[in-house]
Image: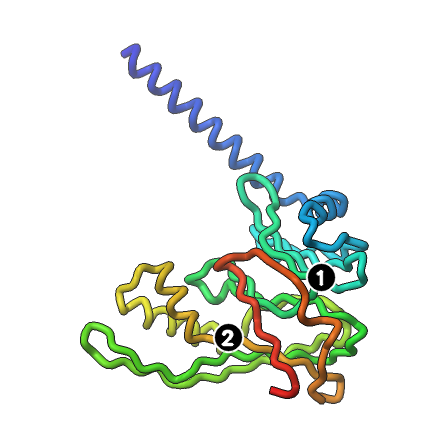
Amino acid sequence: MKKLKVLLLILGAFLLVTLAYVYYDQSQKTKMPTDEELIKELSIDETRDGVKHIQDKVKIDDNRLFVPYISTKGDYSISLWEWDRGKWELRSWGQKGEVRIWKGKLSKPSSYYLVWNMSPKDNIGQIKVSLGKERVFYVSDQEMRYNPEIDLSTEINVENKTYGYQTISEEWVQFLTHYYQAETAINFDSLFNHVFANQFIVYTWIAKDAKGNIILPENSVFGNGSGGGESVDYIIYQSPDE
């Protein structure tokens, strides 16, 4: 009986500690980091320019925070933060705010967001983002498989604000969901499968002015950046000459 009481006390204490941690974690998650905290973290790495101004702090969902900012050199930059072990961690940053895809869960395309921060010097009216896949022939389980060519595009109005975010289109969600499911059927390891499948998918973007003419956004492209791992796809800028 005494051993049972001790065991119950231990289990009770463990449950209390777990509940206290969950409560603390959730309460901290609702708090936005201050501008000073964000600037300090962004300034640690000497390869990054300093921060002149935090433009906004936008919660994409409970675990993701989008922070566009202006650097000390005047670039319109981007930083992506994720909640991890009780605090907001910098996952990815870009000196230029070129469009990229931010994935909440790799296997759930409906959690994918497009994020950007374009320089107003470029006078961009729209950005056109395309998902492309070449025709692919390959053999699996002694069967010849064929995936047809795909070209899906979406246009985003960016005339009124330099930065923004939005979920990928329902057309993209349906295609990527079916595509990953089909690739998973080949029986690859799930993470390897995601990388393997992505080898055949190419994301590109172009910029247009308010009249719909394709332009070169020279102040918004070709900057340094890093981080993100599998959760961030960097979209290739397609110049007007290509």
Numbered label attached to residue 130? none
Q: Position of residue 110 (x, y in %)?
A: 49, 66
Image quarter (top left, top right, bottom left or bottom right) of the N terminus: top left
Q: Which residue is mark 2?
A: 170
Q: Secondary structure at mark 2?
A: helix
Q: Residue at x 77, y 76 (%)?
A: 122
Q: Secondary structure at mark 1?
A: strand
Q: Which residue is mark 1?
A: 77
Q: For the view shown, which residue lies furthest in the top direction?
A: 2
Which of the two residues, 4 or 185, is positioned nearer the viewer here? 185
Packing grade of label 2 (10 A; few <14, some 14-19, many >=20) is: few
Q: Position of residue 204 (x, y in %)?
A: 56, 77
Residue 62 seen by the camera = no
Residue 95 seen by the camera = yes
**Number of marks in the image?**
2
Marks 1 and 2 sit apart, C-alpha to C-alpha, by 28 Å
Quadrant housing residue 213 = bottom right
Report the amino acid beneath label 2: Glu
Q: Residue at x 35, y 15 (%)?
A: 6
Instruction: Tell me which numbered mark, 1 or 2, is placed earlier along the sequence.
Output: 1
Q: Position of residue 45 (x, y in %)?
A: 67, 48
Disc 1 to disc 2: CB gap under 8 Å: no
Which of the two residues, 3 or 42, is positioned nearer the viewer here? 42
